[in-house]
Amino acid sequence: TTVIVERVHPLTKLRPWENIYDYSKYKYTDFQYRVVRDTDTEKWGNIDVILAEYVEGVGYKGEIVNVPREVAYRELLPAQLAL
C-alpha cells in the first residue's frame, strides 16, 4: 500500500536556532494532509455497490451499480451513499 499526501497548509517557519523536533513549536494546521493518491483504490478496477439513495449520474436507491473503485472509496462510501 502506498499513500501519497500533500500538506493542506504551508509549514510554520521556525527561526534558525529553534529545534525542528520540538513539536510544541508547530500548529495544528502543520499536521493536516490531503490524500493525493492511494494505490489500494487503484488495484482491481471496478466494484459493485448498492446505492443507499439516488445519486445523479450513477443510479437510483437500491440499485446494484458497477463503479470505479476510486469513486466508490472517495465519494460514495464516505458519504454513506452506497453500501
Image (tube, rainbow, N blue to C red):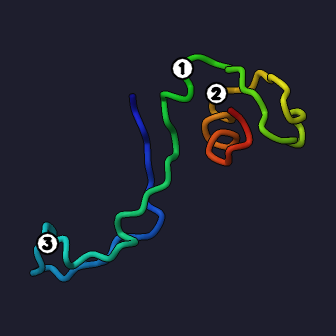
Label 3 Cα neighbours within 10 Å, binned few <14 / some 14-19 / many ≥20: few
Q: Does residue 3 lie above or below 28 as drawn?
A: above
Q: Quick one: quadrant of the N terminus? A: top left
Which residue corresponds to mark 2? 69
Q: Amino acid at mark 1?
A: Lys
What distance separates the C-alpha of mark 1 from that of mark 2?
8 Å
Image: 12 above or below 66: below
- What's the amino acid at mark 2? Arg
Residue 63 x/y as whole percent: 85, 26
Depth check: 40 or 59 in front?
59
SS category of the residue bearing label 3: loop
Q: Is residue 29 left or right of residue 61?
A: left
Q: What residue is pinned by disc 1?
A: 43
Label 2 crowd (10 A; few <14 / some 14-19 / many >=20): many
Residue drawn where x is 77% and y is 21% of the image: 66
Can you identify the residue that label 3 sits on? 22
- Pick whichever, 50 or 13, lies toward us: 50
